[in-house]
């Protein structure tokens, strides 16, 4: 609950900042700022090497926790510096714009900061102290909100804005080191310790699947923005980012919940597969319902709140936002199933699932752009690639007897039926009314089914069989 409430609050404040930047700067400046952030986000997805889940798994099971943390930190710091250089090289190789290159140099410093924070965040997850992380990130969101307020008072050049944000990130890093880290984290001890290049290669070599899994999750979204910036217009870049910003707000809830579900899956799996099966089934139902709720909400209200939040110049983005939110129907349960595979130490299978899905996405985008120069191509390509990813996961989990053909079929049939019913309802009455009517009926029906299947029969055992009252 700390994670959920904290992230809702953070996203509200971060979104205010994003909205203010979109409103206060011209579309070209905003688009260039987005492109520089896209390069950084693309690189940071690789810079952590995706070792967070491996680290949690090892930290829970190892006795010498301090030694493992020392190794993990030094690896993250070294690769953070390396990938900062990659960030600069990419910006110079892909774009001729001096503004994009300058922004990339400053914004890219976050790669190093993020890698250090990454270590502390995952220590807190493994130790069950996520509350520290959430408090500090909430404080960062408040400071970013104050910068947004400042933008309404004075005009700040977009380059200076990126410098202010780097200074803010440095404050966050210091808060993590001083107050947000576990007693296991000691910066002086870590810098005094040594790790050989052979050991680094060994850790990365044994866990290279995590690198690909962690990277692809970022590539999925950021490669779309890069392709849009090269094929379509600056306005399309801005519309894509607005849509993705809203999508990222919706996806943050299952992502945060999964950070707590994953340790639960690990502990349940250590007890037995039956226990993990229970955790998986319960979480799956909640994740699936959340995906339906998020999509129907955006379908009903995007035309209203997108122009309201970002201004009339972004009114077209509501259409693309609805298209992108098709993926939220599948994303939460796909995330859960990926965690199940990693829990069972099948991360290499999960890696190949991710690679196949990415290749499908890029192929569909390539085919689509050759025929239609539209942002919709990217949105639909991501949806169908995610659907393929989910189906591949289903097949693997059925074979491993974690789920069943009936459960999988029920998910797809019920999802399609509910979306079809909702779409039909929205064509008959106002979209806003259809949302509340649909979910009102669904809530009543769900409650009735729950009561019917969980009703307990009370057996009265008589104390005296000869007593008719008893």
Image (cartoon, helix red, strand yellow):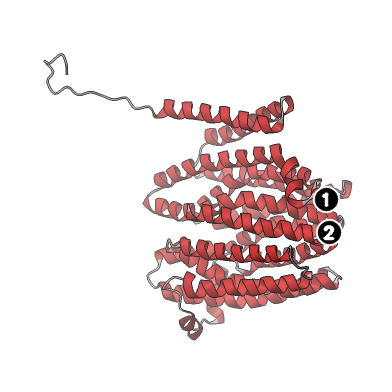
From this view, report whether residue 292 is shown above or below residue 461. Answer: below
Give the left or right position of residue 246, taking residue 342 as reference. Answer: right
N-terminal of the pair, mark 1 or mark 2, is 2
Residue at the image point whose x is 82% and y is 52% from the top: 366
Q: Position of residue 322 (x, y in %)?
A: 73, 42
Q: How far apart are marks 1 and 2 (CA)?
A: 9 Å
Instruction: For label 2, count other residues whose C-alpha is less than 10 Å away and answer few (under 14), some (14-19) or many (20+).
Output: some
From this view, report whether residue 88 is shown above or below residue 440. Answer: below
Residue at the image point whose x is 55% and y is 43% from the top: 287
Residue 39 badge: none
Give the left or right position of residue 205, taking residue 248 as reference. Answer: left
- Of residues 135 and 48, the one nearer the viewer is 135
- Of residues 158 and 360, the one nearer the viewer is 158
Residue at the image point whose x is 53% and y is 66% from the top: 136
Q: Are marks 1 and 2 in contact (CB under 8 Å)?
A: yes
List the residue tagged with mark 2.
27
Q: Where is residue 429 in the image (x, y as percent from the top left)?
A: 71, 26
Q: Quadrant of the C terminus?
A: top left
Question: Is any atom of residue 55 visible in this view?
Answer: no
Q: Where is residue 142 in the image (x, y as percent from the top left)?
A: 60, 63
Residue at the image point whose x is 63% and y is 58% from the top: 13
Give the left or right position of residue 465, taking residue 50 as reference. Answer: left
List the residue tagged with mark 1.
313
Q: Residue furthest top?
A: 468
Assign a secondary structure to mark 2.
helix
- Of residues 149 and 87, the one nearer the viewer is 149
Assign a secondary structure to mark 1.
helix
From this view, report whether residue 87 is shown above or below residue 417. Answer: below
């Amino acid at each position: 609950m700390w994670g959920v409430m904290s992230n809702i609050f953070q996203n509200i404040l971060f979104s205010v900042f994003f909205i203010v930047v979109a409103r206060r700067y011209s579309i070209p400046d905003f688009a260039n700022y987005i492109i520089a952030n896209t390069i950084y986000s693309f690189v940071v997805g690789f810079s952590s090497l995706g070792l967070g889940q491996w680290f949690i798994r090892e930290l829970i099971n190892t006795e010498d926790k301090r030694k493992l943390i020392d190794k993990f930190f030094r690896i993250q710091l070294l690769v953070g510096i390396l990938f900062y250089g990659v960030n600069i090289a990419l910006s110079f190789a892909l774009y001729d714009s001096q503004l994009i290159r300058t922004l990339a140099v400053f914004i890219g410093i976050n790669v190093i900061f993020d890698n250090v924070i990454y270590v502390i965040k995952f220590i807190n997850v493994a130790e069950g102290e996520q509350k520290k992380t959430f408090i500090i990130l909430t404080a960062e969101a408040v400071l970013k909100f104050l910068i947004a307020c400042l933008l309404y008072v004075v005009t700040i050049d977009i380059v200076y804005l990126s410098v202010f944000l780097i200074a803010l990130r440095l404050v966050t890093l210091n808060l993590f080191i001083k107050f947000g880290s576990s007693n296991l984290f000691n910066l002086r001890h870590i810098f005094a310790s040594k790790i050989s290049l052979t050991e680094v290669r060994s850790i990365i070599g044994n866990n290279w699947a995590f690198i690909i899994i962690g990277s692809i999750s970022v590539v999925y979204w950021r490669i779309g923005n890069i392709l849009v910036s090269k094929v379509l217009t600056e306005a399309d870049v801005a519309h894509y980012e607005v849509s993705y910003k809203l999508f990222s707000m919706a996806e943050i809830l299952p992502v945060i919940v999964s950070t707590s579900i994953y340790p639960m899956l690990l502990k349940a799996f250590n007890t037995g597969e039956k226990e993990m099966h229970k955790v998986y089934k319960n979480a799956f139902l909640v994740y699936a319902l959340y995906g339906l709720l998020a999509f129907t909400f955006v379908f009903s209200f995007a035309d209203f709140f997108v122009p309201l939040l970002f201004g009339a110049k972004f009114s077209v983005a509501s259409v693309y936002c609805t298209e992108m939110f098709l993926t939220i129907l599948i994303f939460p349960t796909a995330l859960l199933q990926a965690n199940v595979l990693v829990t069972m130490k099948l991360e290499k299978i999960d890696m190949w699932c991710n690679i196949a899905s990415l290749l499908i996405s890029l192929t569909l985008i390539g085919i689509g752009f050759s025929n239609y120069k539209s942002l919709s191509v990217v949105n639909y390509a991501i949806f169908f690639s995610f659907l393929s990813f989910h189906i591949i996961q289903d097949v693997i989990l059925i074979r491993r007897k974690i789920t069943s053909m009936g459960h999988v079929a029920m998910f797809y049939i019920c999802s399609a039926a509910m979306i079809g019913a909702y779409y039909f309802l929205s064509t008959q009455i106002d979209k806003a009314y259809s949302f509340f009517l649909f979910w009102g009926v669904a809530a009543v029906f769900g409650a009735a089914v729950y009561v019917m299947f969980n009703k307990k029969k009370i057996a009265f055992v008589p104390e005296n069989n000869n007593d008719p009252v008893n």
